[in-house]
Image (cartoon, rainbow, N blue to C red):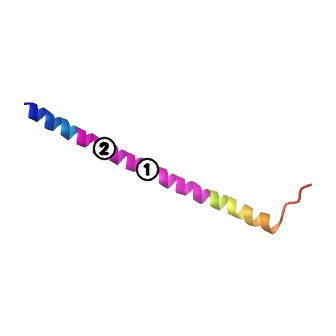
Amino acid sequence: MCTLMFLCHLYSLKLAIALLFTFVSHIYKVVTATTMLLLILVVICVKPYLLSSKAYPIRAS
């Protein structure tokens, strides 16, 4: 009985760790994808501005 409880506890612990690992890796993928999208958006938005400011320097009035 004691061995059975120990095995059950061990199995649930392994399951919990596996679920946690899957959850963390999923969140990491989502965060990475979101970060990449934000970086791409920033580059798309900022690049034309930088190019235009180099072409036409804004004079301080």
Task: Tell me what residue is drawn at x 22 percent, y 38 percent.
Answer: 12
Residue projecting furthest to the left:
1
Can you say which quadrant of the picture contains the N terminus?
A: top left
Residue 32 lies in the magenta-colored region: yes
Compared across the picture, whether 2 is left or right of 57 comes to left
Which residue is farthest bottom?
55
Write down the region rendered in magenta: 13-41
Secondary structure beneath disc 1? helix
In the displayed structure, 16 sits above or below 41; it is above
> In which quadrant will I find the C terminus?
bottom right
Name the N-terminal-most of marks 1 and 2.
Answer: 2
Q: How many marks?
A: 2
- Mark 1–mark 2 Cα distance, whole angstroms, equals 14 Å
Residue at x-position 39% and y-position 49%: 26
Where residue 57 sits in the image (x, y, percent)? 84, 64
Question: Which residue in the protein does label 2 denote?
Answer: 19
Q: Callout 2 environment at 10 Å: few (<14), some (14 to 19), or many (20+)?
A: few
Q: Residue furthest top?
A: 1
Q: Amino acid at mark 2?
A: Leu
Residue 42 counted in the magenta span: no
The residue positioned 9% from the left and 35% from the top of the image is 3
Residue 31 placed where, x, y %? 48, 50
Which residue corresponds to mark 1? Answer: 28
Amino acid type, mark 1: Tyr
Position of 41 with respect to 12 (left or right) is right
Magenta segment main secondary structure: helix
Residue shown at 33%/43% (left/top)?
A: 20
Q: Is residue 20 left or right of residue 56?
A: left
